[in-house]
Amino acid sequence: MNITKLLNKVYFAPRLKEIELYTEHAGELQAGVLKRLVRMAANTEWGKKYDYASIRTYEDFKKRLPIQTYEEIKPYVARLRAGEQNLLWPSEIRWFAKSSGTTNDKSKFLPVSKESLQDTHYQGGKDAVAIYLGINPESRFFSGKGLILGGSHSPNLNSNHSLVGDLSAILIQNVPAGQLYPCAKQGNCLDERVRT
């Protein structure tokens, strides 16, 4: 039995239906996410500074918060890295993703909450698999060998006991010799073939 087909039917295909709703109701869904995030962060230092408690709409949010760069947020991140909490987000921040430093040649430390890990990082990976299997229904994604290279397999422990790791990763699926990766058909693979 192809375990990929079973997992797709039970988990990924239903999720793909949810993802497809995003295209039909994107504005409503984004407004809901904004309200939820603003409500959750209302009692943080940042939320109090910008009076998140009174924000009801995207227009309120846009008027209340100026566009800012990392440099304006950097002092808060430094305080988080020193162990202070409830500054930008209410739950404990112990992890920081380290960017590659694309704008000013310096790495940026991006706070990562447990909610961010679940709702963004982990869910994004699952959603990518759901979309892939939707495009490639005959895939044996979970039935063969694969290679995943993450940026930081052992995050660094800072002196303040927070964990720091980078954001990069590579995923390679094993495809039988002579067959093309599905992405090669679309012209967006680094390498067109993998030999078994």
Image: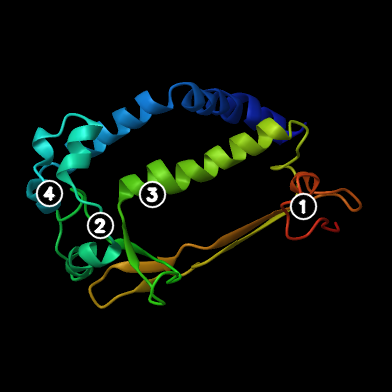
Residue 55: % across, % down: 14, 34
Query: Tag 2 or tag 3, which sits nearer the N-term?
Result: 2
Q: Is residue 37 left or right of residue 136?
A: left
Alpha-carbon span between mark 4 and mark 2: 18 Å
Q: Amino acid at mark 2?
A: Gln
- Per the model, the C-alpha gap separating discs 1 and 2 is 43 Å
Residue at numbered disc 4:
44
Q: On screen, 52 above or below 35? A: below
- How crowded pointer 3 is (Cα within 10 Å; few <14, some 14-19, many 20+) is rated as few
Look at the numbered disc 4 and give the secondary structure of its residue: loop
**Residue at horizontal 35%, vertical 47%?**
116
* First along the sequence among labels 1 and 4: 4
Q: Nearer the viewer, mark 3 or mark 2?
A: 2
Q: Which residue is mark 3?
A: 117
- Work out which residue is located at the far right of the displayed protein and give it: 178
Q: Is 83 situated left or right of 21 in this image? A: left
The quarter of the picture where the N terminus appears is top right
187 relative position to 170: left or right: right
Residue at (86% x, 49% y) in the render: 176
Q: Nearer the viewer, mark 1 or mark 2?
A: 2
